Amino acid sequence: MDKIGLRTHYAKEIKPELDSEEVVVGGWLRSIREHGRLKFLVLEDKSGSIQITAKRGDVSDSVFENISSLGKEWVILVRGKVKKNSEAPKGVEIVPTGIDVLSETADTLPLDFKVKAELDTRLDWRVLDLRDPKNAAIFKVQSKLIEEMTDRLRMMGFIQVFTPCLIGAASEGGADVFSVAYFDKRAYLRQDPQLHRELLIAAGFDKIFDLGPSWRAEPSHTPRHLCEHRGCAVELSFIRDETDTIKIEEELVVSALQGVKKDCREELELLEKDIKIPRRPFPELRFPEVYDILEEMGKKNRLGEGLDREGERLLGKWVEEKYKHEFCFVNRFPFESKPFYVMRVDEEPQWARSVDLMFKGLELSSGGQREHRYDKIIKQAKEKNLALKNIEWFTKFFKYGVPPMGGFNLGIERLTQKLLDLENIREATPFPRAPERLLP
């Protein structure tokens, strides 16, 4: 395919082997240094940076003089010849024959990403903040995580689907939902694409995944919460039990981390991170034994309670010490703490076939086996004090033959945050949505 656009090459493509070739590069002017008869420019694009070297006598007088009028973060197009130079970064530079200004900046930049700023300030000026190669590297890693997971799912026979973000009733019956005006009615932003994935399984789709946003109206200001977050949501049918979903999720995580380790070496070097590929199988902990582990570590839980933040942190520490592993699955949660649609253990109905994936002491996903038997779903909805008429749009299809099924929703931002040890999950999304932040 022919080159499209104004450039012939990205900065990363300028190598000593191109010596004497004519090229055109474009990007942001990061710095200018002048030393008498020499002027050095550093131009940066999405791939990296390249040095532009202008020496009086080697370039035209107009090019040489005009360099002094350029400003930091201006968008420029540079035409020139590649020159091998062992003293230049990466052993190569460009000698300019022409420089075009595509866009100028205001006199003073509101954010200099080379100077450490508070996160709120960075997010106020997020576009400038994302010009920092380290911050951009986060999203190149995140993109690779998604690419590897979705490629692996397709290889295993899953197809991608899109489920509604607008729904007519709160999907989990809770209060943490955003309501929106929908013509003459009220609608809600989904908390999870869970229920519509189940309906597609009921329709016979067998193996599906959905990649998209969900919303939680939680007034939470912790470093691990977002009001809008994305997940890789997987559903499959004809399963034996929740352990089949565990195997799929393990496969996705290991594949994703292998892909990042292999293809994101430059980004990981920038971020000063080394990816450890987890061994399989991941440790699996189950209730009620989880209570015993937590009690050993000084935390007493009431029977029927799930996990709070402190419990997650302690379990992560325990797994690290006992198994030397950063991941673990927590299974068989108390049904009391879970939504109506999860499947209970028939012989021990106080426990649910509900599975969380933990990474470095933080929940990444929730899933497990779903209840596919109509009478059981109705019974459980009643136990949760749900108005049956509000969920009939979902439950009525289970009268007409639905296979055993299960799945999970793996949080993209949380996986990115913990993998790269980011202090705040807001660093793992370009434009975070939080209780106090709706712009930019």
Image (tube, helix red, strand yellow):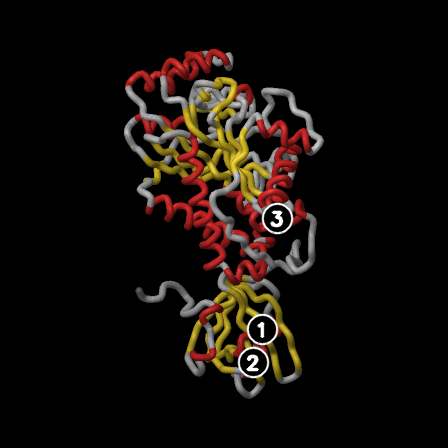
Residue 125 rendering spot, x and y as whole percentages: 62, 49
Q: In which quarter of the image is residue 9?
A: bottom left
Please say whether residue 406 is visible from this viewpoint. Answer: yes
Dot 2 corresponds to which residue?
Answer: 54
Residue kind at label 1, given as amino acid type: Leu
Instruction: Nearest to the eye among marks 2 and 3: give it.
Output: 3
| Nearer the observer, 169 or 109 | 169
- Give the position of the N terminus as an image quadrant: bottom left
Measure the C-alpha gap from mark 2 to mark 3: 40 Å
Instruction: Nearest to the eye among marks 1 and 3: give it.
Output: 3
Please say whether residue 132 is visible from this viewpoint. Answer: no
Residue at 56%, 80% (x, y): give it. Answer: 54
Position of residue 257 relative to residue 19, above or below, is above
Residue 265 rendering spot, x and y as whole percentages: 51, 61
Measure the C-alpha gap from mark 2 to mark 1: 8 Å
| Nearer the observer, 255 or 393 | 255
Residue at 38%, 38% (x, y): give it. Answer: 209
Residue 373 rendering spot, x and y as whole percentages: 36, 18
Which mark is first along the chain, 3 or 1? 1
Position of residue 98 relative to residue 250, above or below, is below
Residue kind at label 3, given as amino acid type: Leu
- Contact check, label 2 and label 1, Cβ < 8 Å: yes
Q: Is residue 172 left or right of residue 398?
A: right
Which mark is first along the chain, 1 or 2? 1
Count of marks placed on residues: 3
Q: Is residue 211 left or right of residue 364?
A: left
Dot 3 corresponds to which residue?
Answer: 422
Residue at 48%, 68% (x, y): give it. Answer: 12
Helix, strand or loop at disc 3? loop
- Give the position of the C terminus as an image quadrant: top right
Q: Mark number for residue 41?
A: 1
